Amino acid sequence: KAGVTQTPRYLIKTRGQQVTLSCSPISGHRSVSWYQQTPGQGLQFLFEYFSETQRNKGNFPGRFSGRQFSNSRSEMNVSTLELGDSALYLCASSLGATSEQYFGPGTRLTVT
Amino acid sequence: GEDVEQSLFLSVREGDSSVINCTYTDSSSTYLYWYKQEPGAGLQLLTYIFSNMDMKQDQRLTVLLNKKDKHLSLRIADTQTGDSAIYFCAESPNSGYALNFGKGTSLLVTP
């Protein structure tokens, strides 16, 4: 069974631009969560989607948004990029709310 | 949220056992996880334990859970150089679907 895939793997953007990251969950998994990983703050939860509905959101500004499609694929968008948004963005999928989460390789975003 | 605490660094010799400790925050957490991250990679789920268990063994890995003290540990037997990585402890509170991670323990295995 294929794992969680994320595209692109690396991205360089300029301050003020916007970016869209994509995540394809493991086949059959309907829950997708997004996390931001930085050296200073560690791993922080962004949001979680299940059956196209956002069920939980972390403490991030409104510039961070996401969505989930009917095939469970998910995208996250960051508008008006700031230098501090440079991070590894990780997506995780699971069968349901209390199931273990499996992570993708991440998208490394660099904002210059 | 409150912090999941882990020691930042551990160094062991190849062939020895490694013990990585974690203190979590939410007594209602249903699952507790250990993830491994190698340089430039995502998180690999190593093992997890349900909150009504005290111990779980999976090949070279042993997880111990002390609910009273909210303490979780991961023991790696016969540690190999390929085990060098960052290990994250994570809790899954009942109140939501987000995992709450520790800052990670960097394990260095020397020959």
Image (cartoon, rainbow, N blue to C red):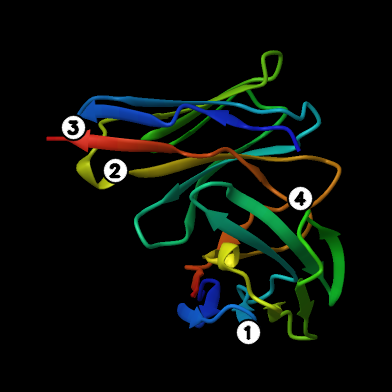
Disc 3 on helix, strand or loop? Answer: loop
Distance CA(mark 1)–CA(mark 2)? 37 Å
- Is mark 4 in CB contact (under 8 Å) with mark 2? no
**Tag 1: Cα neighbours inside 10 Å, few (<14), some, or many (≥20)?**
few
Disc 2 on helix, strand or loop? Answer: loop
| Left or right placement of residue B46 versus residue B77 in this view | right
Distance CA(mark 4)–CA(mark 3)? 36 Å
Distance CA(mark 3)–CA(mark 2)? 10 Å
Residue A1: x percent and y percent?
51, 74
Above/below status of A47 relative to A14? above
Foreground mark, 3 or 2, reads 2
Q: Which residue is mark 1?
A: A17
Q: Which of the two discs, 3 and 2, labels the residue nearer the N terminus?
A: 3
| Left or right placement of residue A67 versus residue B99 in this view | right
Q: Which of the two discs, 1 and 4, labels the residue nearer the N terminus?
A: 1
Disc 4 on helix, strand or loop? Answer: loop
Residue A74: x percent and y percent?
70, 79
Above/below status of B20 relative to A68? above
User: Mark number for residue A98?
Assistant: 4
- Look at label 3 and name its amino acid: Glu
Same subunit, labels 4 and 2: the answer reads: no
Q: Residue at x 47, y 55 (%)?
A: B44
Q: What chain is tagged by disc 3?
A: B
Foreground mark, 1 or 4, reads 1
Above/below status of A41 relative to B108? below
- Look at label 2 and name its amino acid: Ser
- Which is nearer the eye, A14 or B64? A14
